[in-house]
Each structure stands twice: as structure tokens, then as C-alpha cells.
Image: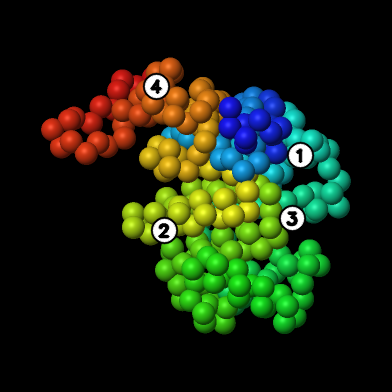
Amino acid sequence: MTQAAALPPLLRVEGLTVRFPRRAARRFGRSEPFAAVDGVSFDVRAAAALGLVGESGSGKTTAARAALRLIEPCAGRVLFDGRDVLAMPPASLRRLRREAQIVFQDSAGSLSPRMRVGDIVAEPLIVHGIARGAEARARAAELLDRCGMPADSASRYPHEFSGGQRQRIGIARAIALRPRLLVCDEPTSALDVSVQSQILNLLKDLQREFALGMLFISHDIAVVRHMCDEVAVMRGGRIVERGPCAEVIGAPREAYTQRLMAAVPGLDPRRPLALGAPA
């Protein structure tokens, strides 16, 4: 057992359920919600990474956002370092934001186009009363430099940067408060392959440097294998398989996980792509 595995979980999610009304039901005045997340349970340990993997629409992002109360769940229990997240009043939830941050998939949409990059990264420091004025600007510049951004980045606007650079800005903002948990919601899915590897290596370095617990959401098995210690496979709002990354990816037990593994392109052009039979 690794040292990380021996520690109590930083984030514990138990029976998390999120339901949304169906569009047709709203149109005709009926309430027939469907469960986007249905009784999901998982743990994220300090200094370790859990991968949530599954096809689009499987509930990965909804589960992660509900665990942070960016979406209000209908049922379940969420404990952060032993504290009940779902029972927190607004003041306590605000303090939680210092300890749990998120890197969004849409780097352009998550950054205000009206704010300079330095102000975007400094904003969490100002909001939480950690630094102001010249000190906040200096710390923002340090964070941008740590995330590999050019020296003049702070005075420019998000639209002046590439997608990979905007994701670096989002990461700099996320680590500004020195969180203990970082949720990464498909942080490289919209990036070129060469840029993906740079962003993944940056996240891996930051995880080691700050001993971050990480919840990493992806549909890319290769990325999860590189980034995560454990993996949970989601399908239709439920977790169908979970365990150490090497075991689940190397020898999946569930038919759905096996089909996900079979759909990963190989390096041998003579080997056909085995997508498997539909469920």
C-alpha cells in the first residue's frame, strides 16, 4: 500500500445523485426528471489522483460539479476533510473554495474577456483577502511564470493567447489559493496533441509540488493512465468499475470497460479497431 493510499480520503462522495427535468416534461407541464448522476460514490486522497472516465454524457462533469456544490445534488453525502459539504452555510462554503478549485474544459469561456490576465489570476487572492494591490499583482505574475506564461502576459487579454496558453492561465488562477484539491474537467480535450502533453506535465508537476489531491475527468484512457493512481469508470450516471489504474485499465472486469479499452487506437496499423458490440 502506498503512503497516499494509507491516508484518509481528502474528498469522500457517497451515493451522490443529481436529477434534471426532461425538456419534453417541462414543455407539457409534467415533472419527470432523469438521473444524470445516480448514486455515485468515490474517494480522492491527498497527493493522489482519481480519474473519472467514460463516454460523453456519462455524468462525469455533473458528478464533479455536484461534489463541489457548483450544482446542488438531490441526494447523497459529500465530505471534504471530514466536513459535510452539502450542509455548509454560505460562509463555510466560501472558505471551502480556498481548498478546492477547478480547471474548466472551456478555457476561453472560463476567462472573462474584459479582464486582463493579471487581474484574472489575482482576483481569487483579492476576493479571499489574501493579497491586494501591488502584492496581488506580483503574486499573479509569479503564478503565471510558474505555469509557463510569457513575462508580459499579465497586461494582455485572454483572446490574445492560444488555447493552450489560456488553459495555463486557468491553471494559474486555480492554484493561486494553494488548494488541497484540484478538479480538472477535461483540461486538454480541445488542445493539439503536442500542447496536451505540455499541459498534462504541468499539472503533474504541480500535483507533486503542492501535494494536491486531484479529480481528473477525461474520456481519454491514455491520459488517465498517465495522470491517475486510481480510476472510476462511469456509464449512464453510475460507476460501473473502479480500482487502481493499472488493474482497471490493464485487466478490466466489466464489459463496458473492456469496450472502452478496445476503442483506444493502437500503434499497429494491421490491427482492426475493435469497438465491440453495443450494450
- As drawn, the label of residue 81 is 1
Name the residue type under label 1: Asp
Asked if residue 65 can be seen in this view, the reply is: no
> Does 234 appear above or below 27?
above
Report the residue at 56% width, 60% height from top.
171
How much space separates mark 1 and mark 3, taking CA atoms?
A: 13 Å
Say which label, 3 or 4, has the lower sequence index: 3
For label 4, the residue is: 251
Quadrant location of the C terminus in the rendered image: top left
User: Hey, which quadrant is residue 2 in on the image?
Assistant: top right
Q: Nearer the viewer, mark 3 or mark 2?
A: 2
Residue matched to label 3: 98
Circle 2/circle 1 CB separation < 8 Å: no
Q: Residue at x 66, y 30 (%)?
A: 6
Q: Which of 74 and 228 is in front in this view?
A: 228
The residue at the point 45 percent across, 52 percent down is 200
Work out whether mark 2 precedes mark 1 in sequence or the reverse, and give the earlier one. 1
Mark number for residue 91? Answer: none
Instruction: List the residue tagged with mark 2.
Output: 198
Q: Which of marks 3 and 4 is in front?
A: 4
Disc 3 residue type (three-letter) = Arg
Disc 1 secondary structure class? loop
> Residue 167 vs residue 1: left or right?
left
